[in-house]
Image: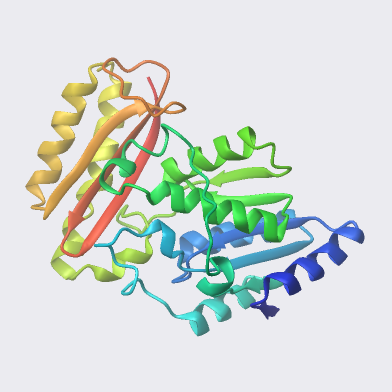
Amino acid sequence: MKIIKSIKKIQQILAKERLKGRSIGFVPTMGALHEGHLSLIRQARRENDIVVVSIFVNPTQFGPKEDFKKYPRNFKKDALLCEKCGVDFIFYPDAKAMYPKGYKTYVNVEDLGNVLCGKSRPGHFKGVATVVTKLFNIIGPDLAYFGSKDAQQAIIIKRMVEDLNMPLKIKVMPTVREKDGLAMSSRNIYLNKKERKAATALFHSLKAAEKFIKKGEKDAGKIIHLMRRMIQEAQPKKIDYIEIVDAQSLLPVKKIKGKVLIALAVWFGKARLIDNIIVHG
């Protein structure tokens, strides 16, 4: 496994691999790797000749009051995990390389980035779309892997790839969960014992919503009310949102019909946790 910091160098190396007819699988990350990331890397390893993982905490997707400086970073541990999973190259650029002085170009997927998490994190998805576009241009993968936990992000990236005619395929893999249902996240380390236990209410509320829909409940408002009550019993610091939206347009639905995304964001202590499920009504 090689660790490459230079944009030019990784481009040159991967250009040679492509000339040999080798397929490139890519997993973009911000580091602090956990089993969720590793499941994506293993899938990439199964399906590609070359596997590239990027580790870059992207400053443009953090708001001024968000946890950019405190975001967990442990490159040594991340590199060991990558090596164990059979990664060929870690692309590890710094912010000056990715956003040199005078940088002015951003990618914005309109509408999809302004709802759900985009409401409380303005500019977040513009930062995500920009850095992912840059990474795709640098790495030039055949396949790129994302997790379902960040459903809005995956939907935005799929739309961006389609709209901009990018020559790659996006694979969205299932959310990896702890035994008690909590979605794995780099931000889970912010939780104390009490908060960690309480946070399981998120998954339980999603499963309860799914159960009610399968029993025939079609009123989105009633289901959201039920979920809110369940989560409030766990005494979170704050419920950011609980929404039921169309799984493609991300527009809110009143009556559940077809494929819907049930998504939420809730604060427990210092951690803003997101989770979701897709349900067929």
Going by the picture, which residue comes out furthest to the right? 20
Q: Is residue 127 left or right of residue 225?
A: right
Q: Is residue 236 visible?
A: yes
What residue is drawn where x is 31% and y is 20%?
253
Going by the picture, which residue comes out furthest to the front? 102
Residue 165 percent coordinates (x, y): 69, 36
What residue is drawn where x is 26% and y is 31%?
209
Residue 222: name its quadrant.
top left
Q: Is residue 233 left or right of residue 175?
A: left
Which residue is more in the foreground, 43 or 12? 12
Residue 140 percent coordinates (x, y): 73, 55
Going by the picture, which residue comes out furthest to the bottom? 76
| Image quarter of the C terminus | top left
Residue 75 percent coordinates (x, y): 50, 80
| Image quarter of the N terminus | bottom right
Say above or below: 155 vs 81.
Answer: above
Coloring scheme of the render?
A: rainbow
Q: Is residue 174 left or right of residue 93?
A: left
Give the tally of numbered discs: 0
Which residue is more in the foreground, 114 or 79? 114
Residue 223 percent coordinates (x, y): 20, 26
